[in-house]
Each structure stands twice: as C-alpha cells, then as structure tokens.
Image: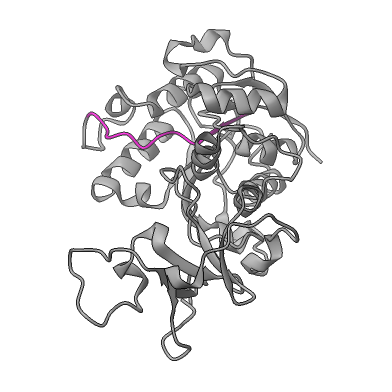
Amino acid sequence: MQSFKFIDLFAGIGGMRQAAEANGGTCVFSSEINRDAAATYEANFGERPHGDITLVDEKDIPDHDVIFGGFPCQPFSICGFKRGFDDTRGTLFFHILRIAKSKRPSCLVLENVKHFANHDGGNTLRVVVAALEEIGYSVSVEVINAVDFGLPQNRDRTIIVASLSKAFDFSGIVRSERVAVSAILEAEGPFEVVDPGEYTLLGADVVKVQKQSGLRFVGYRNRNLRKVGVRAGTEHLSRVHKQPNRIYCSTATHPTLAAGESSGRYWILVDGKVRKLTMRECYRLQGFPDTFRISASATSAYRQIGNSVPVPMIAEVVRAACRQGVIGGLPVVGLRAA
C-alpha cells in the first residue's frame, strides 16, 4: 500500500478522510466550518479541524501529496470560462486553488453533486477545469454512482481528479456487484414501524424496478400529494409524492440520503411491514463503519450523513489513482507551475 500525506478540506464528518486512510494516507491538516460537523470529526479522529478555510494562510498548511475536498457548489462570480484562475475568485473553490497553487500537491480529488457538471450550462465546471489546468494540472471529470461500489444507495456524484503526473483514467475504477438495502439492515430494533392505516402499498402490476438506479417504489404514506402537475390516477408514480412520504423496498436500492433531511424520514418495506431506516442504517448506506461515533443530536446526525460522501466509492477512486501513479507520481516534464 502506498503512503501519502493529504489535507481534508470542507471535511464534514470525515468521509473522504476514511477513504484516504484506508489506502495508506496520513492526514496532516483538516478544515470544516460547521461546528457540529467539526465536533463529530473530532470525536472520531481525535483532532479538531481548522475552521473557516478563507481565513487560513496557505503558507501555514503543511506540505502534502493530495488535496481532498467536497467543496460547496456556490454560484461563480463570473459565468464565462476563458479567464481561468481569475474566474474563480469569490468562490470557495478558489481557496482549494490557492492552496494547490502554493503547495503543488501531486493530486486533487474533489467531489460535488451530480448536477454540478451541468451547472450554468456547464460553464461552472469549465471554469474549474480551466483554472486547474492553468496552474499545471491534467483534469479528469466523471459522474459516478455509489450503487456501483457496494452501497445500496442511488447517489450520483461529480468526481474531479487533477494530477501533475498524468490524466486520471476513470475506466480504471473497479466497480462492485450491486447489493440491496437488506444487506445493511440491522437485525434487531427497536424499529419505528408505521401503522398499516397510515400508508398505501402499490399492486404488483404497477411496481417496477428502475433499471439505472435500481430503485423500487412500492408505496406511499397517506399524506398530501404534490400540487403542481399531478393528475388523477397517478398515485403509483413516485414523483407524485414528496420524498419523505415515499416507501421503497428493501430488496432493491435506496434513494440518495438528502442533506436537507433533518428527521430521517426514509421509509422501507421489510418483510411485509413498513418502517423507518434507523440512524445506524443511514450511516451504513454511506459506508461508515458501526464504530463511527454519531452526533448525539439526531437533527445534526441526519444532516451530517446526508452531506457526507460514499466512503467505498471515494476509496476506489483513491486506489485507482494510486495504481495509475496519479497519487505520488512525478510531475510530467513540460507542465508549468503558475
């Protein structure tokens, strides 16, 4: 296993750190502005992350080989994409860029939501790529899904890998056989079971498994339907129901855990009964080990896991980068530092 030093920016509760450490990485600096997330990070890794990265001088950050960062998708100050580095000023991505420009790590592994790749008609991504290329990095981008890395969660994410040595090849990632939600369920409760009078299960004639996502929508809680664009007789369609009212089957995959869901309203059909996913099951859906210390605040805990990354997915990106020499590789002759 290759050893390397890394920094963990916009660290959240440490999903990327777990993926890096599992592949020989040693964290030398971390930053997270949210106090609750930072407290959970400290409880699990024994160190308190630095706070606001905009206030950290890059010269004070230790030398490192890799930058990891799940940076927020803020609107960019300039929508064009021809000015590279200058176009990113005023965004949080700029602070990743200024550190990379100063420290020259061999690699950056960045993560964002699926739609980041198409934000502002693709201009935002083009600005990011152009800015990284301007300071000497080869950049590869792809949207990949947690469901292809041993997790029963349909979670598409945009992954950006930038390297000083050579372009990262996403085709070198090893994908896993898909598993169902049943694989991560706890054997014993207590479980929050829903009264049968409070939900409706769909008939077998209308229940389908979505081919790409693996989702199987099987029912809904008897709450108000969506108001806009809803026609009579379409209750069998998941989009008619708000996400917290949908029921999915444990023999298929689960929808994306949402960053804005603070009550953990994720409902599954298990052995003929509908119940809520437990907190631990939500963390398992992201690949967090059962030894991980979860925030005592349920509201914070649900938001933190919804904001985190699928650990096995990032871990495989890191493994592939190590195999390809992208992490720890020597800079390609001719690449210039800005």
Q: Is residue 145 left or right of residue 312?
A: left
Q: Is residue 295 above or below residue 204?
A: above
Look at the picture and state if 90 lies above or below 116: above
Tell me, yes or no, if residue 36 can be seen here. yes
Image coordinates for residue 177, horizontal then vertical, percent: 67, 69
Q: Nearer the viewer, residue 157 or 231?
A: 231
Q: How is the image coloured?
A: one colour
The furthest residue to the right: 1
The image quadrant that residue 276 belongs to is bottom right
Q: Is residue 329 visible?
A: no
Is 71 covered by the magenta stretch? yes
What quarter of the picture does the C terminus occupy?
top left
Quarter of the rendering containing residue 298: top right
Location of the N terminus (image quadrant): top right
Residue that appears at 68% across and 18% down: 47
Counting from the top left corner in percent of width and height, residue 40 is at: 62, 28
Image position, residue 188 (x, y; %):
75, 58
Magenta residues span 65-77
- Secondary structure mostly taken by the magenta-highlighted segment of the chain: loop
Q: Is residue 17 left or right of residue 122?
A: right
What residue is drawn where x is 38% and y is 24%? 94
